[in-house]
Structures are given as C-alpha cells and as structure tokens.
Amino acid sequence: MPGPGHGFILMQEMMQTNLWVDAVYTLLIILVCGIIYIKTRELYELTGHKGIGYFRNVFLFFAISYLFNFLIITPNNARGTSIPNVLLLSIFFITIYASTIAISYLVYSVLWKKTHKGFFGKQWPIFIIAFIIALIPVLFQKTLLFVIIQAALFIFAVIMSFFNNKRSKAKKGFSKLYFIYILLFVFWILNTFATALPPFFLQIKVFVYLISLILFIIIVWGVLKRINVKQK
Amino acid sequence: MNKKRERLEVIYDILKIIREKNNSIKPTPLLRYSNLSSQRFTEYYSELLEKGFVKEVKDKKGKKFITLADKGFRYLEKYQTILGFINDFNL
C-alpha cells in the first residue's frame, strides 16, 4: 500500500515531466523562429525594406521571449533548484516585454506603409509601450490586463492585415500575411491557455503544444516556400 | 504601388543596365539609360556605392567605370524572390 509520501513523489514526478515537456517545446519554438529570422536575412540585407524588417523582428522577439521563458523552466529547475524571486520576476518581465514587442511589430508590419513618416516610422515607441505593458503584471500582479492588451494588439494586426490583403493585388493562395497572423494569434491563444493549465493536465498540455507546433511549422513552410521559389 | 517598391525597381533597373553593358559602364551613359533625373540618379548611385552594390574602377587612362559588386549580382539574382515575398505577404 502506498505510504503518505507516495502522492508527493507522484506530484514531483509530474512536475518534472511538465518542465521537460515545456523545455523541449520552448526549444522547438525558438528553433522555428530562428529559421524564419535567418532565412529572411538576405532579403532584408539586400533591400533594407522596412516591412521585411518588421516581419523578421516579430519572430526574433518571439524567440527571445521563449528563450527567457526557457530560463524559468530550465532542466536545473526541474531537479528542484529554486530561483530567487527577484530573478524570477526579472525573467518574467523580459518574457512579457519581448512578446509584447513581437506583437507590436506585427502591428507595425501592417501599418508602416500608411504612416511610415509618423509614429510608425520610428521604432522606439514599441519599446516604451512594451516596457510599460510588461511592468503591469510585475508591479501590480494584474496578469489578465497584459493578456487583454496583447490580445487586442493581435486582433488589430489580424484585422488590418486582412483589409490590406483585400485592397492588394496579391495572388490568391496560402501566402497571405493575415493568414500567418491568424495562425500566430491562434498559437498565442493556445499558449496562454497552456500556461494556465495545472500540472496534472499534462496530456491536454502536450496536445495544445502539438497543435501550436503544427501551426508554427505551417508558418515556416509558407515563408520558406516563398523564399525558395525558383527564379524565372 | 508604393514608394519603397519604386525604389526597389529603380535599383534593379540600374543594376541591370550595368550587367547588360558587360558589367562596365561610364557614369554618364548609366544616367541616360536609367531614365532618372540627375538629382535622383546621384542619390541612388551614392546609395548603391555606399551599400556595396556597385564599385568604381579606373582604366589605364584614368577613366571611371562602374561595375557590379557581388552584392549587386546577388540583388539581381534575388530580385524576383524579393518582389514575390513583399507582394505575397503584403509587406
């Protein structure tokens, strides 16, 4: 018959499995973001095109966000090493800061052509706004507020990219910015949901992660397909 | 469609002219073939030189010629991909 410590050991094992699942998933997302960033480097270096630059930065800052997230759930942590609270809060802050910058670049990438001489011509507002948004959960423990702000930014970017696409003469098919942004938005919703899941919902978490990975792979495939298209 | 696209096209046209002239052309004919005003040509030419798309060489008589640098060839090679990427993603 299991002793009184049996439940505790089971819980610890479950926590460790959770952390490993999180770690592997995070590394895969960083890898995929890195592929998009590296593969679009030449196009950006050759043209200095702002739209391409903003598009790349979305994935760069998502990767940074996930990298810091990875530091929180490092395998050392899985073995029970505790992180000092201040450090944990700082990493949490950077994670939110980087993800908000990434989402802000989504907005910039769809708006820069219309207003490139004004506010959207400069990048510093992104960093200041993201800093303020990231401070909210750290200082006031109001996590829901930053989730709502990020969701609002996402919805705005998706709607704007949809209308941009309607006005443009781009050929029909998969390669549409708004489609990619919808996938990213779904990915963000799934990840926010997965973060809120308690450790004993491991199967659901793995399922959510798998769907997220599939969404990201579709995005990479779309981008690489466009980059590697044969020249006429 | 937008100013940026025009800029990319102009760069492509200038680089293509240089390549079509056996990768060696004097500045004055290049200005003529590019269909740009003198001021706009100077702006683009300075940018292309500064960013390493083209380079200036002098012959034995000291006459200046413009040739494509590696980056210029790469731009020509990738131009369709660049345009396709920008159009498809509405960037």
Image (tube, coloured by chain):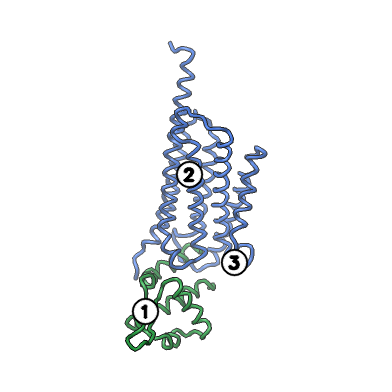
Closest to the camera, between mark 3 and mark 2, is 2
Amino acid marked by disc 2: Leu
* Crowd rating for badge 2 (residues with CA inside 10 Å; few <14, some 14–19, many 20+): many
Q: Amino acid at mark 1?
A: Thr
Label 3 sits on a secondary structure element that is loop
Q: Nearer the viewer, residue B55 or B7?
A: B55
Quadrant in the rendering for residue A17: top left
Residue B26 sits above or below residue A18 on the image: below
User: Considering only order in the chain, which callout, 2 or 3, is on the residue closer to the N terminus?
Assistant: 2
Q: Is residue A172 left or right of residue A94?
A: left
Where does residue B79 sit, x and y in percent of width and height? 40, 70
- Give SS at disc 2: helix
Residue at the spot x=48%, y=78% of the render? Answer: B44
The residue most toward the right is A140
Q: Colour of chain A?
A: blue
Three-letter code, disc 3 = His
Q: In the picture shown, does residue A227 fall above or below A149?
A: below
Which residue matches tag 2? A67
Separation of disc 2 and disc 1 at Cα?
A: 44 Å
In this figure, which residue is indicated by the disc labeled 3? A116
Return the residue at label 1: B67
